[in-house]
Amino acid sequence: MATLRAAWLLVVFLFMTLIVWIVLTTTLRLRLDASRRIPGIFHRMVLRTLGTRISVIGTPVSGGGLMAANHLGWLDIPIIGTVTDVSFVAKQEVGTWAFFGTLARLQRTIFIRRERASAAEDRDTIRKRLAAGEVLVIFPEGTSSDGNRVLPFKSSLFSAAELKVGEDQRHVPVQPVSIAYVGLHGMPMGRETRPFFAWYGDMDLVPHFWGVFRTGPMDVVVELHKPLTIAEAGDRKRLAARVEATVRAGLVRALRGQGATAEIRNEELIGGLKDEEPESEEAA
């Protein structure tokens, strides 16, 4: 039964992705406002298909800012995209990836180029998007983990936090975000099971996809911590260290079931959110 269920869900997912890709490509080509809302709807559809339930603690930053999150794999994209309206910052290579590269481009991901000559132009693009009130997500680990730990944050990925935007030339707020995969079929998820959902190292995509669909519905805790600025931290390295410590502490609390009572969002779009209480390299 598990195999048949997984096969059916995978077919539904691929068909749904094709339809959304066609619709989003068309709306972007016609410059319709609806294109901004479609990625969030798609993310919710993906999580509903997988049976994923999200518990959200805290309030997302708004009015232009950065989110700095730990990274477990491709599932983090629809998870964060369900919590709030965001775009992502990723290395240029992500745009060339099959499937994920297309989805990243459709969600207006900013691809950072390695050439020094392009650095000023990339920073200007980020500045304009932040000044326009957008929230951009970075994954400062620079890669993904197995979900049981937080890897060291790279301070270089916080360069956008040095930007000043708006008429008052304020520093961009940075919100630490902890993502924890905590449950499976409504039961606590053990550390040996978590890597089935994380996509990291040299994992092949197709077997990983199949494993995610076959293993079953997952519970996730997303903690949105208090934002801070580089001015409050002192400098970029101190900012990276403080954000890393905050994200790590949130992950540990969630995995131990020690978090505060979670505020649950999006229950009208993600089926089954209130059925049970939750157990107490850059984006693409």
Image: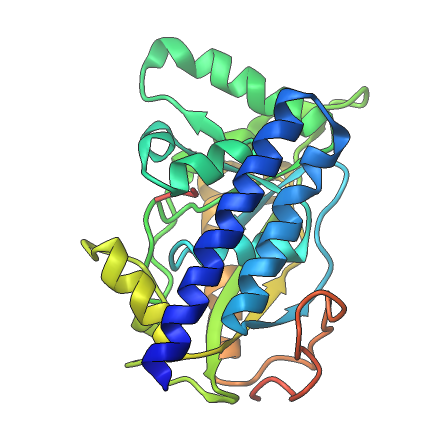
Please give left or right for residue 162 compared with residue 156 in the image. right
- x, y percent for residue 207: 24, 63
Q: Is residue 153 visible?
A: yes
**Residue at image location 39% in from the left, 36% down from the top:** 101
**Residue at image location 61% in from the left, 44% down from the top:** 39
Placement of 237 over or under 119, stated as above or below? below
- x, y percent for residue 6: 38, 73
Which residue is nearer to you in this view: 126 or 202?
Answer: 202
Rendered-image quadrant of the N terminus: bottom left
Which residue is nearer to you in this view: 240 or 212?
Answer: 212
Please give left or right for residue 15 compared with residue 100 in the image. right
In which quarter of the view is residue 70 placed?
bottom left
Q: Extreme left residue here?
A: 202
**Residue at image location 63% in from the left, 36% down from the top:** 231
In which quarter of the view is residue 210 placed?
bottom left
Which residue is nearer to you in this view: 94 or 99?
Answer: 99
The total number of labels drawn is 0
Please give left or right for residue 89 compared with residue 86 in the image. left
**Residue at image location 55% in from the left, 36% down from the top:** 22
- What colouring does the structure picture have? rainbow
In which quarter of the view is residue 65 placed?
top right
- x, y percent for residue 139: 44, 46
Placement of 52 over or under 16, stated as above or below? below
Q: Extreme top residue here?
A: 117
Which residue is nearer to you in this view: 22 or 92?
Answer: 22
Rendered-image quadrant of the C terminus: top left
Q: Extreme right residue here?
A: 167
- x, y percent for residue 167: 81, 19
